[in-house]
Image: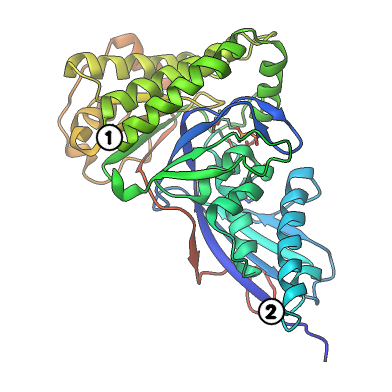
Amino acid sequence: MADTKVYRASTTAPVNIAVVKYWGKRDPKLNLPTNSSLSVTLSQADLRTLTTASCSSSYTDGDSLTLNGEASDVSGARTQACFRELRSRRAALEAVDTSLPKLSAMPVKLVSENNFPTAAGLASSAAGFAALVKAIALLYELPDSPSELSLVARQGSGSACRSLFGGYVAWRMGDKDDGSDSKAELIAPAEHWPEMRALILVASAAKKGVSSTSGMQQTVATSGLFQQRISKVVPANMAAMEEAVKGRDFAKFAEVTMRESNSFHATCADTYPPIFYMNDISKAAIRAVEAINAKAGKTIAAYTFDAGPNCVVYYLEENASTILGTFYPVLAEVTGWKEGTAGIKSAVEIDGSLVSTLKEGISRVIMTGVGEGPIKTEEYLIDENGQAVKR
Ligand code: ADP
Ligand code: DP6
């Protein structure tokens, strides 16, 4: 009898926010970067993608993805590259062990949900592609390590390769033309430095102007400053950041984080025509972080910005009352504050003009911290008959 069984596997995957930024491709097709990068994986208790992958010979519509309840295109080169790579790994297993069901020949149906805004500069593509790759790898029972799977996720979205690990993660740029050495590697697990926290100030949940994919290509093509960045600035920052993480040196971690963000946004401004991801709200957040550090007399908070205006503030749990006690009084009205925050007493007073800019511009906050890599789960978004679960 023909095998019409529905095979399923589910995983969650985290977001990561870089402290040494990936910006520039040396090979846009394979998503090979011009520099290495390093990120902190954020807790899935607060931000996560949940993806169920399934396959069955009874599926008649070809490969499909439903994202947040809506059909999503899978014909793009990046998604196709992920499918192709994973299928060929499964086919290799099936060739060796002919008793295995021929999953590699079946259509794949994916259903995925992000529990945070998609395409709003909150790294949904990183969590999304990491979850897609991990879910299919589980479905296919691939023996590949997270580092091996990162090679596949990288082809979906560069930053996604770092979401295959929890904790503190480097993406080594590699130098091979085929990209086989351009993969993620664990610098330290979350338990090594579990006190790391992140407060995300969401400046705009709207879609961003220039996508990172296109923005970085424009920078590579036109910025002179960029050459200095990839040859000198990033290699030094990577080395310093690895040391800071290994030695749990927050002041050093923070300084490199802020310098990196500044350097990346400077190359954006040096792109011709210039690209501006930060706005007045972002700049107000920078000044607020500086006020916190000035008052503390040491560096206890660090800002960083990706390809959008949202500010991520890294800090250690021991300084939570200072950081939260500065931002909460200004942004008490927005959603996202965790229980207990309201009881923290006011800490650093920030300049009146900054207060009004932040009040007007920040629409929500997310309080989170360092967390784990993808986690296999028995929670399915596709039922045993292959139907999307109504939620
Ligand atoms: P962000 O800033 O959130 O990363 P991008 O515009 O860079 O925004 O990426 C958003 C794209 O990432 C989506 O259009 C989709 O193609 C992909 N993506 C996001 N979430 C998922 C998911 N859960 N599964 C698969 N792909 C996803
Ligand atoms: C500024 O990974 O989104 O967030 O590889 O084209 O999908 P593609 O780009 P993407 O770029 C992320 C850029 C960044 C920095 C970073 O995460 O390292």
Mark toward the start of the polypeptide (2 vs 1):
1
Q: Which residue is mark 1?
A: 247
> Callout 1 environment at 10 Å: few (<14), some (14 to 19), or many (20+)?
few
Foreground pick, 251 / 338: 251
Give the CA distance from mark 2 to mark 1: 51 Å
Q: Is residue 106 left or right of residue 255?
A: right
Within 8 Å: ligand 2 and the Cβ of disc 1?
Answer: no
> SS of the residue at dot 2?
loop
x, y percentage for residue 371?
38, 49
Say which amino acid is labelled 1. Answer: Gly
Which quadrant would residue 24 be assigned to in this image? top right
Q: Is residue 335 left or right of residue 51?
A: left
Which disc number belongs to residue 385?
2
Residue at image coords 58%, 54%: 131
Foreground pick, 250 / 315: 250
Q: Reply above or below: 347 against 99.
A: above
Q: Reply above or below: 205 against 288.
A: below
x, y percentage for residue 254?
33, 25
Residue at image coords 62%, 38%: 158
> Callout 2 environment at 10 Å: few (<14), some (14 to 19), or many (20+)?
few
Q: Reply above or below: 68 against 140.
A: above
Say which amino acid is labelled 2. Answer: Asn
Q: Is residue 262 left or right of residue 292?
A: right
x, y percentage for residue 113?
57, 55
Observer able to see residue 330 = no
Which quadrant would residue 227 be assigned to in this image? top right
> SS of the residue at dot 1?
loop
Foreground pick, 269 / 348: 269
Q: Is residue 125 left or right of residue 250?
A: right
